[in-house]
Image (cartoon, rainbow, N blue to C red):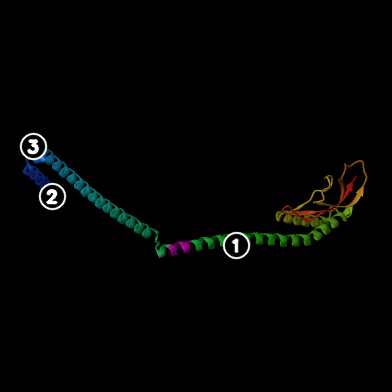
């Protein structure tokens, strides 16, 4: 296209020059030098027009090339984006076996936690049941212990050294030691300040020998089992 435009421009310039020469100096309205100058100016104008046409064509060609390059770059970027998207899709897709393994592991952890809670709860219930049962047995045995103490207190003075009295005392001490080994202990009363959590006041006296709310006499012993009161002490409180 550029070469054809150049040829047309050159042909037009030559035709114009020939017409000026045919007219002559008089027809042209000027001298021969002026005609020569006009011919040269026409050639210069044609050359300039040819150069401008060539530059415009080159610019159009460059723009066309730039557009092609932009389209190629856009196509490459689109292809890269599609590849990246397909790679992410492949990475996001999880293997069914891995999902099944995770599900089974989660179930196993839950079952282990439930079993551990069940074991702790069962041990606590067993311990509570054991203590409740032991307290019931101890509470039923304490009256027997009270009778031993009453029997020893009822022994006459002249019979305290007898074999019978000594045998009863030995049985009593063995009984007390067995209860102590099982966790049973007597509650202190005489000389201690009255504590409603440990003592049961059934009598009250005014005596200057004792302080305020001081226990002056123990009517029946109280006992604790592993820190828990099985039976309160029956006491007399002074002041």
Q: Is residue 31 above or below residue 18?
A: above
| Mark 3: few/some/many CA within 10 Å (<14, 14-19, 20+) | some
Q: CA distance from mark 3 to mark 2?
A: 22 Å
Query: Which of the pair 66/205 is nearer the observer?
Result: 66
Sequence-first disc among 3 and 2: 2
Nearer to us in this view, 215 or 27: 27
Tally the numbered discs.
3
> What residue sits right under mark 2 in the picture?
8
Q: Residue at x 55, y 60 (%)?
A: 113
- In the figure, residue 83 lies in which quadrant? bottom left
In magenta segment, residue 100: yes
Q: Earlier in the sequence, mark 1 or mark 3?
A: 3
Q: Residue at x 34, y 59 (%)?
A: 86
CA distance separating discs 1 and 2: 104 Å
Secondary structure under the numbered disc 2 in the rendered image: helix
> Taking 37 as reference, is 182 above or below it?
below
Taking the spot 91% from the left edge, 49% from the top edge, the residue there is: 204
Q: Quadrant of residue 176?
A: bottom right
Lower sequence index among marks 1 and 2: 2
Question: 200 or 70, which is in the foreground?
Answer: 70
Where residue 108 appears, as percent x and y from the top left, is 50, 62
User: Mark 3 — residue?
Assistant: 36
The magenta stretch spans which residues?
99-105
Q: In the displayed structure, does residue 48 sit left or right of residue 107?
A: left
Q: Position of residue 114 (x, y in %)?
A: 57, 62
Picture layout, residue 226 above or below residue 118: above
Q: Which residue is mark 1?
A: 118
- Extreme-front residue of the structure: 26
């Amino acid at each position: 296209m550029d070469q054809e435009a150049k040829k047309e421009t050159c042909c037009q310039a030559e035709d114009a020059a020939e017409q000026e020469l045919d007219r002559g100096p008089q027809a042209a309205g000027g001298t021969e030098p002026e005609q020569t100058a006009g011919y040269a100016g026409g050639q210069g104008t044609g050359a300039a027009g040819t150069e401008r046409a060539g530059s415009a064509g080159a610019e159009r060609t460059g723009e066309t090339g730039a557009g092609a390059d932009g389209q190629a770059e856009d196509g490459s970027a689109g292809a890269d984006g599609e590849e990246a998207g397909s790679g992410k899709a492949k990475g996001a897709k999880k293997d069914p076996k891995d999902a099944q393994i995770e599900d089974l592991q989660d179930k196993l952890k839950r079952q282990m936690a439930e079993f551990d809670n069940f074991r702790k709860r069962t041990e606590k219930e067993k311990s509570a049941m054991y203590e409740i049962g032991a307290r019931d047995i101890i509470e039923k045995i304490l009256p027997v212990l009270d009778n031993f103490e009453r029997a020893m207190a009822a022994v006459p003075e002249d019979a305290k050294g007898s074999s019978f009295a000594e045998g009863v005392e030995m049985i009593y001490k063995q009984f007390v030691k067995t209860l102590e080994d099982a966790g049973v202990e007597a509650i202190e009363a005489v000389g201690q300040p009255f504590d409603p959590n440990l003592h049961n006041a059934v009598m009250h006296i005014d005596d200057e020998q004792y302080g305020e709310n001081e226990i002056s006499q123990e009517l029946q012993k109280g006992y604790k089992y592993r820190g828990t009161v099985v039976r309160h002490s029956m006491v007399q409180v002074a002041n």
